[in-house]
């Protein structure tokens, strides 16, 4: 056992499970840092690498994908209100036993499963699916037992934010002006109030 594996404080048996069934010769070890990354955009990049679609030798009937190590899974981000509105549902097989769990609860229970589900649902349903699943090594923290490998950090492409439409921009400007006017109005009303002086009370 290597020193990197010995220094790993997580579940080593789970982290190394299934490695013997993978032909590691000629494969690269790509490391993805999920900290601050959007879940769907990160999963799409990992799905491309684990299928080998980033290589000129890609063929749909061969498994030429690289090993993908994902760290900081607990710090992945989502857009909108998906943290409370997105649900994972499954059925136990008994009548009426439809279970569900929100994304927020799943992140608290096991954040690695969130990224795994997002990636696996982007892969085709064929015989190569299990081999590609074994090439995914996802960790909640920043530690992993593969430091002795020739790992390559994966650089995520810059996020292209769509330019705001003119109508939405005008609405945003109007809302900002309205908020500024309300703020100025509240300050003016506060300044306009006068305290009752003792002299006024005496004269009355």
Image (cartoon, helix red, strand yellow):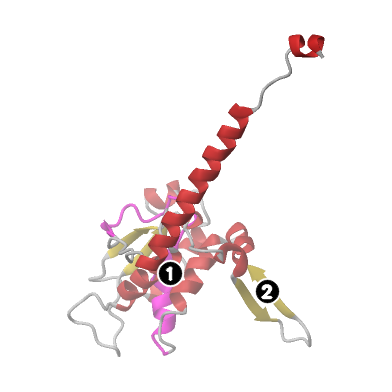
Judged from this view, the residue extending furthest toward the left is 56
Magenta residues (range): 126-155
Residue at x-position 30% and y-position 72%: 49
Q: Position of residue 79 (x, y in %)?
A: 48, 63
Q: Is residue 46 above or below residue 107?
A: below
Residue at x-position 47% and y-position 62%: 15
Structural crowding at the residue carrying mark 2, measured as other residues with C-alpha within 10 Å and reported as few (<14), some (14–19) or many (≥20): few
- Callout 1: SS: helix
Give the prevailing secondary structure in the magenta stretch. loop
Structural crowding at the residue carrying mark 1, measured as other residues with C-alpha within 10 Å and reported as few (<14), some (14–19) or many (≥20): some
Q: Is residue 200 above or below residue 27?
A: above
Q: Which residue is mark 2?
A: 100
Q: Which residue is mark 1?
A: 40
Q: Is residue 51 left or right of residue 91?
A: left
Please state which of residues 202 and 87 is positioned toward the viewer in this rendering. 202
Q: Earlier in the sequence, mark 2 or mark 1?
A: 1
**Which part of the image, by quadrant, shows the N terminus?**
bottom left
């Amino acid at each position: 056992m290597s020193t990197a594996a010995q220094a790993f404080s997580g579940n080593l048996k789970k982290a190394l499970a299934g490695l013997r069934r993978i032909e590691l010769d000629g494969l690269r070890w790509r490391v993805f840092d999920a900290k601050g990354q959007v879940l769907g955009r990160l999963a799409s990049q990992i799905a491309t690498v684990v299928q080998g679609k980033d290589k000129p030798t890609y063929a749909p009937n061969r498994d030429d994908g690289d090993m993908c190590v994902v760290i900081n899974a607990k710090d992945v981000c989502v857009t909108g209100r998906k943290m409370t509105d997105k649900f994972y549902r499954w059925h136990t097989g008994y009548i009426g036993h439809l279970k569900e769990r929100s994304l927020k609860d799943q992140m608290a229970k096991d954040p690695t499963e969130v990224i795994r589900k997002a990636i696996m649902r982007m892969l085709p349903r064929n015989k190569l699916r299990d081999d590609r699943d074994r090439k995914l090594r996802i960790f909640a923290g920043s530690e992993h037992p593969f430091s002795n490998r020739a790992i390559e950090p994966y650089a995520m492409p810059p996020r292209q934010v769509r330019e705001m439409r003119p109508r939405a921009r005008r609405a945003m400007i109007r809302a900002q002006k309205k908020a500024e006017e309300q703020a100025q109005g509240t300050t003016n009303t506060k300044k306009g109030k006068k305290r009752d002086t003792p002299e006024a009370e005496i004269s009355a």
